[in-house]
Image (tube, rainbow, N blue to C red):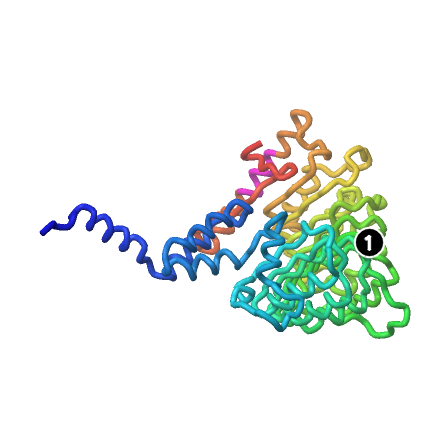
Amino acid sequence: MELPDTQQFSRETNRQRSLALPPEILIHIFSTLSRTKNSQPTLHSCTLVSRLWYSPAVQALYECPIVVGRNFDLFVNTMCPSVNVHVKKNGLAILVKRLDMRMLVHDKSKSLTPRILQRCKENLEEFVAPQAPFAINSFAALSKCTNLRRLDLSSIAYTLDLNSFFNSIKGLDKLEFLYYPPSCRLNKMSEHPSSWPKNLRELRIPGNLHEDSLEFMSSFPPSLRHLGIESCPRLIVSMVYFLLQKLGSQLESLEIKYSRTMFGEGSLDHILFYLPVLRRLSIPAEGITAVFFTCISDISPEDRPPLVELELTCANSENESVVIDCNHIWDAVVDGGLSQLRRLKVHRSLEWDLGREGRYDMKALNQMLQTLALEDVEASGSYETVDAGVWLRGVSLRHA
């Protein structure tokens, strides 16, 4: 009688033990993998290891699918094997939580996007719309995705009907982040204001923002805390102040970026008067002067914004009228107007790092902000590390 190979038996036993990890551990391991086009074959290979690995690996594979190139066709064939959405349903669509279709430029069928949304609606939490046309039936399917938390429509290259858009999102009670479509058309027959999702916390507005649509969309929900305005060539100062009059009292973060608009000198000097609870502000340096920092003392202490982070961008790098320097911020921090400021980000075109005196002032300001942040940590009894100091176009002085 031939005895079994004990070494081979031991290897087989160890292999089985190495694969017998609890599903919770496998799910955690797969969740740490970066989601790239190259990671999908890896996750697919994991589904073939054993029955124990199959379910966690499939869950990770479809939770955030990468749908570009040939992957998109395979994804569509899996999610929508039939034109009729009521036929051949499978259990994979409910696994999709994040779906990014921004790379889809041309849609061979206007029904494709709504069919995918219809299939994945049950657990879909994040959706980035394609550049392809967003037809009226896409709005109907979008309104059924009631678990959506993040919605990005910034890639759509076609004009949307504003009325249809708001009708589709008003019932999305879990929606917290919205990237507004870059181009919308307002139906002149509409008499009712917009109806935003009631729990919306962050709104970003890119592209064309028209004055005639502001009044329609100005009934913002009380939950809104963060507003970003990006790449709006028609943006004028009066539109900014109109928005701040409507929701400035509730904003904790405001960003005005990448606008080709040439704000008049000092046109944004009094913007903080409308923002009593603001903690983060990003504005073009062309729109402010030294008055921006000195007039803060005119605001009563109880209405003074607790600004922690300030970013000064520069839309026109050749604009020589910008005269903001380190001393303006230093004085505002010392005098109490910006006593809670801890992070300052400035564009290199402001030329703070040119000249020996400028570099010395900037390093002194950086040191002061870091010291104040350490004092905050000690006063709170916390041991958390806090990023503080001065950044030049994203580079901290500690690494510059």
Residue range corresponding to the magenta coloring: 363-370
The answer to if 368 sits in the magenta stretch is yes
Q: Secondary structure at mark 1?
A: loop
User: Residue 27 is drawn in which quadrant?
Assistant: bottom left
Please identify the quarter of the rendering in which residue 288 is found. top right
Spot occupied by residue 309 in the image (x, y as percentages of width and height): 63, 49
Please provide percent x and percent y for residue 313.
72, 42
Q: Determine which quarter of the picture holds residue 345.
A: top right
Residue 142, percent from left and from top = 68, 67
Relative to the observer, which residue lies in front, 373 or 38?
38
Can you see residue 165?
yes
Would you say 16 lies left or right of 364 here? Answer: left
Can you name the residue that lies furthest to the left here? 1
Q: Is residue 297 visible?
A: no
Q: Position of residue 90 (x, y in %)?
A: 54, 68
Give the residue at x 52% y 67%: 91
Q: Which residue is more in the foreground, 396 or 306?
A: 396
The residue drawn where x is 85% and y is 56% is: 238
Is 151 displayed left or right of 217 in the figure?
left
Q: Return the residue at label 1.
A: 208
Label total for image: 1
Q: Amino acid at mark 1?
A: Asn
Q: Is residue 45 left or right of residue 151?
A: left
